[in-house]
């Protein structure tokens, strides 16, 4: 259960974001056999896919439709090629236009400055310098749509482009913090060694290019249905870490709950939360496919007891004969609803053999609930955070189920882990900037506490009065949940001796 809504959006909504048109460029150089690709790590503070390795690209501008593209099949294709070429030039100073080979390095810098300063449109500068875009220089490489669980979604056209002679890409925007050329097979191997995070279309592109720039390159890119705009239901952010977002009756801004299937031979199913038959069927079909490949479902593991994390447990138990594991406190909370067959203790190790093998250390991380569990693989640098840290919005601490003090201690425990590459939360996309995200959560919680204490000191004595002063970024429909969050903070402040309650239940500051 996420804590109401994101701090930047006052609208409580359960509708997925509408995808925006975008383009990305798989820039290559070298021979056809196993060429190099240019990719880079996205900055940790970005709103979309922070910390992920990605290709240059971005959202389509209306002005892209004004750019002439020779040999384009239609206006939409021309517009997206123009978008790809413009983004490549803005971000890496690579101008994939015919005639650009006659420009000196200084002239290229001047042309880019004209574009980024707004003195010229992309169409205008191409015309002014006698440059032409040709669709034959932009090999179609599929079209992927961001899954509905993301707060920002894109309908992205991918193109393979050979880096023009005499041009060298450079990272020129704050979007990327590191990157460069890497042989495609080596890039893919780094991902397999858990050295970096990347989204499925990026890994698919690297894998395809590693197979060579053959005549059937576009067909190989389109060999998976997701590259033809089919919704991505199984998201493998790291090898053996597969996320299946399932529609659940969760709280805004989330619309889905992430079920995780971890393991490359034997696998464990975490939080099959959907109560809906069609979504349960999606998950069952996927498990059936894995079993048909000779893989074995070992058990179901629950991070905590909330309905949007356990709604599909009994269906899977009955269909596949699986046992259910959870913390003892979670089992008590689920009594009469879901039978827990064994208890998971802090420090327990779940060993999953395969290629690669996965070794998950259970962590009792109370806060969101008292029996909340997280799971950490140090080698992969991967942490399943349940609902303690999520990829969309913040987290509700309800005093009947959790504790702000415990929650902060659990976040600090995350912060002390020796290696983190990714956080896999119960809602929203995976987080590729784990320490920055944890720090953001800690800072957010401390700020809420300071603001609540300030409100009490200024005369607000009830949760409703405090919410009216502090939660101005939250829609009124969500104020009931916000009051529960305030109450949890007040309990901690009371324990700290900073506030007190009178006989009527009003809070006042200790002087």
Image (cartoon, rainbow, N blue to C red):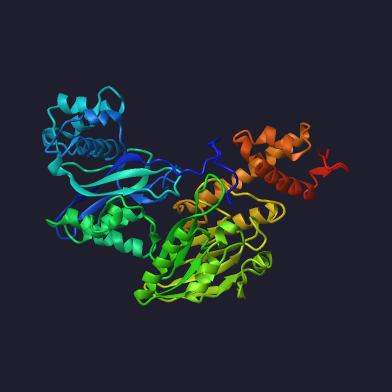
Percent from the top left, x then y, of residue 134?
13, 38
Percent from the top left, x then y, of residue 69?
16, 34
Q: Nearer the viewer, residue 348 or 135?
A: 135
Write the residue at 79% across / 32% down.
Answer: 459
Write the residue at 20% across / 58% down.
Answer: 220
The quarter of the picture where residue 187 lies is: bottom left
Note whether 15 is above or below 415 in the view shown.
Answer: above
Residue 416 appears in the figure:
no
Write the residue at 67% across / 35% down.
Answer: 470
Note whether 151 is above or below 432 in the view shown.
Answer: above
Note whether 284 is above or below 225 in the view shown.
Answer: below
Q: Give left or right: position of 72 versus 507.
A: left
Q: Give left or right: position of 116 versus 373.
A: left
Name the residue at the right extreme: 503
Q: Nearer the viewer, residue 314 or 395?
A: 314
Write the residue at 64% across / 53% down.
Answer: 408
Image mark count: 0
Percent from the top left, x then y, of residue 163?
18, 45
Q: Quadrant of the C terminus?
A: top right
Percent from the top left, x then y, of residue 431?
46, 52
Residue 362 appears in the figure:
yes
Name the residue at the top extreme: 119
């Amino acid at each position: 259960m996420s804590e109401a809504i994101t701090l930047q959006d006052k609208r409580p909504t359960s509708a997925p974001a509408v995808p925006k048109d975008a383009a990305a460029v798989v820039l290559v150089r070298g021979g056809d056999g196993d060429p190099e690709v240019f990719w880079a790590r996205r900055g940790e503070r970005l709103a979309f896919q922070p910390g992920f390795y990605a290709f240059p690209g971005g959202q389509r501008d209306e002005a892209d439709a004004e750019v002439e593209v020779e040999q384009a099949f239609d206006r939409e294709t021309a517009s997206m090629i123009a978008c790809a070429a413009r983004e490549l030039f803005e971000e890496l100073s690579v101008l994939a236009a015919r005639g650009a080979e006659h420009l000196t390095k200084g002239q290229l810098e001047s042309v880019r400055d004209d574009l980024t300063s707004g003195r010229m449109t992309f169409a205008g500068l191409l015309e002014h310098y006698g440059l032409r875009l040709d669709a034959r220089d932009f090999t179609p490489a599929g079209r992927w749509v961001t899954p509905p669980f993301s707060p920002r979604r894109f309908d992205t056209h991918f193109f393979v482009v050979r880096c023009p002679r005499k041009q060298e890409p450079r990272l020129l925007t704050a979007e990327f913090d590191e990157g460069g050329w890497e042989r495609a097979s080596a890039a893919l191997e780094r991902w397999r060694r858990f050295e970096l995070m990347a989204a499925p279309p990026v890994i698919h592109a690297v894998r395809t290019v590693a197979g060579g720039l053959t005549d059937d390159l576009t067909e190989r890119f389109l060999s998976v249905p997701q590259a033809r705009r089919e919704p991505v239901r199984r998201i493998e952010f790291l090898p053996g870490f597969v996320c299946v977002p399932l529609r659940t009756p969760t709280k805004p801004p989330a619309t889905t709950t992430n079920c995780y299937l971890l393991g490359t031979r034997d696998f464990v199913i975490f939080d099959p939360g959907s109560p809906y038959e069609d979504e349960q069927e999606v998950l069952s079909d996927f498990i059936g496919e894995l079993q048909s490949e000779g893989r074995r479902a070992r058990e179901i593991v629950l991070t905590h007891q909330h309905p949007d994390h356990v709604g599909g447990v009994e269906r899977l138990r009955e269909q596949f004969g699986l046992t259910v594991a959870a913390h003892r406190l979670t089992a008590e909370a689920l009594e009469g609803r879901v039978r827990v067959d064994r208890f998971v203790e802090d420090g327990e190790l779940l060993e999953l053999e395969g290629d690669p093998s996965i070794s998950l250390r259970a962590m009792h991380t109370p806060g969101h609930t008292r029996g909340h569990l997280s799971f950490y693989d140090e080698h992969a640098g991967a942490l399943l955070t349940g609902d303690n840290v999520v990829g969309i919005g913040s987290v509700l601490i309800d005093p009947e189920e959790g504790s702000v003090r415990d929650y902060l201690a659990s976040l600090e425990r995350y912060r002390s882990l020796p290696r983190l590459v990714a956080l896999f939360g119960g809602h929203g996309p995976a987080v590729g900037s784990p320490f920055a995200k944890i720090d953001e959560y800690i800072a957010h919680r401390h700020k809420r506490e300071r603001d609540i204490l300030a409100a009490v000191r200024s005369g607000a004595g009830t949760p409703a009065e405090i919410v009216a002063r502090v939660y101005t970024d939250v829609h009124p429909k969500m104020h009931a949940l916000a009051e529960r969050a305030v109450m949890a903070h007040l309990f901690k402040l009371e324990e700290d001796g900073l506030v007190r309650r009178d006989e009527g239940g009003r809070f006042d500051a200790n002087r």
